[in-house]
Image (cartoon, rainbow, N blue to C red):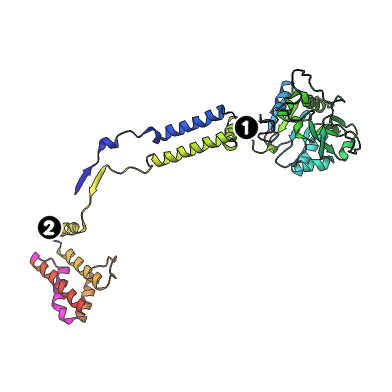
Amino acid sequence: MTTVPMDHANAASPAPWYTRPGIVIALLAALVMITALVARTPVTGRSGDPRLSTSSADPLGAKLLYELADRLGWHVVRDGRGVVPTANTTIYSVLDPVVPVTPEDAGAMLAHVRRGGALLLVLGEGTSPLNDSLQLTVDRQGDDVAQNIGAVRPCADANRARFTRDALWFGNARMLALHGKGLSRPGLQRLVLLESRPNIVTDGPRSTMVGMPYGAGRLVVSADPDVFRNDALRECRYGLDVASVRALEYLSESGTAPRRTIVFDEFHQGRTRFGMSGAIERFLRETPPGRVVLQIALAGLLLLFAAAPRVLPPREQVRIERRSPLEHVDALARAYVQVGATRTSAQHLVRGLRRRMEHGAARGKRGGLDEDQLYLTRLADVKPALASDIAIVRHALTNPVDLGEFRRVGQAIQRIEAALTRT
């Protein structure tokens, strides 16, 4: 057996840095985070995640309402379980949910108000059970928020142009309106009024947001989520920051005790992912620079998988040179001669004869001495002329013979095969 050792100096040489998973993956992660933080992408007043979530700092989110209430002294809580509070001193806030409110949820919310709690509600596609119970719908024929009735008070900013490139509305804020029999409830207060136009016939002043008593508690209902959005509240000239605070003050009053806790429902906003991880995800998925970075990262991972060492266990660092089949037969024959294994050799010769004559029928069969003897007996019955040669072979199968007699066994096998082949 010949062995050739490999070059251990080459095997021990360190792999290039770009094939080391720890280095490449760390560099890709750093590249994604740095690019997401540094890249400048155009952001307008109506972009980003549209959910009215108090965890979202996007222009369309409601985090500013959460922080404003916190700064003004309310105890604010985010609830991700969808459980309606039971304390009468709690204001429950459901802001334009994207996960539909079930009739059971709607019943629990209204029961909370009837017991003496409060509900801040923004109507939307997910609030149908509440719309039916309150007999209120959203009138898509909206209008400008009225400025001359004191419902909202815009800030005075003489140094700022009235119409700017980043303005949400050209002029006053424009909102959707509430409609339905629920507007005729006694004690209703209109918190955000709309301007009445001559060509629209209404039963009274049109409103975007109203407050009303309901059982022992209070409700504030808004038809338009823009009342509480970040980009609308941060612009004082629209006056919606004042309207939002007035709505919270209305809900806090007229109870057995002031309602100073606000629970913002985040369960019906869906699985919200904001913060650093959400910002990186939206950057990679929604912006051109992010998609380029993602493609570079995927290409780097493919290069890593192609060039890195395989995870299979290493083989021994030796190369074995195999024998040829003829060398193997010659070595086996010498081994049989050294130990005098004439009976085993004779059995192999008979097995080979059987395979060749029976066209491979005996291949893979372990068989035994009895089968070999039976085969030779059948041959003697069929070919009586081969009886002497068969006797030599049968004797070698059961008795050790010397080298000269074993040569006669081989010659007998050859004559038997020749006779069988001719016939």
Q: Earlier in the sequence, mark 2 or mark 1?
A: 1
Q: CA distance from mark 2 to mark 1?
A: 82 Å
Rendered location of residue 353, percent (x, y): 21, 70
Residue 390 colored magenta? yes
Residue plotted at (38% across, 42% down): 310
Q: Is residue 227 left or right of residue 400?
A: right
Viewer-proximal residue, 383 or 340? 383
Secondary structure that dominates the magenta span: helix
Rendered location of residue 238, percent (x, y): 78, 26
Q: Is residue 12 above or below residue 379?
A: above
The outermost residue toward the left is: 404
Q: Is residue 91 above or below residue 337?
A: above
At mark 2, the secondary structure is helix
Q: Quadrant of the C terminus?
A: bottom left
* Extent of the magenta region: 383-403
Q: Is residue 137 above or below residue 37?
A: below
Residue plotted at (42% across, 35% down): 21
Q: Amino acid at mark 2?
A: Gln
Please name the residue that numbered disc 2 is placed on.
338
Q: Mark 2 or mark 1: which is in front?
A: 1
Residue 274's mark? Answer: 1
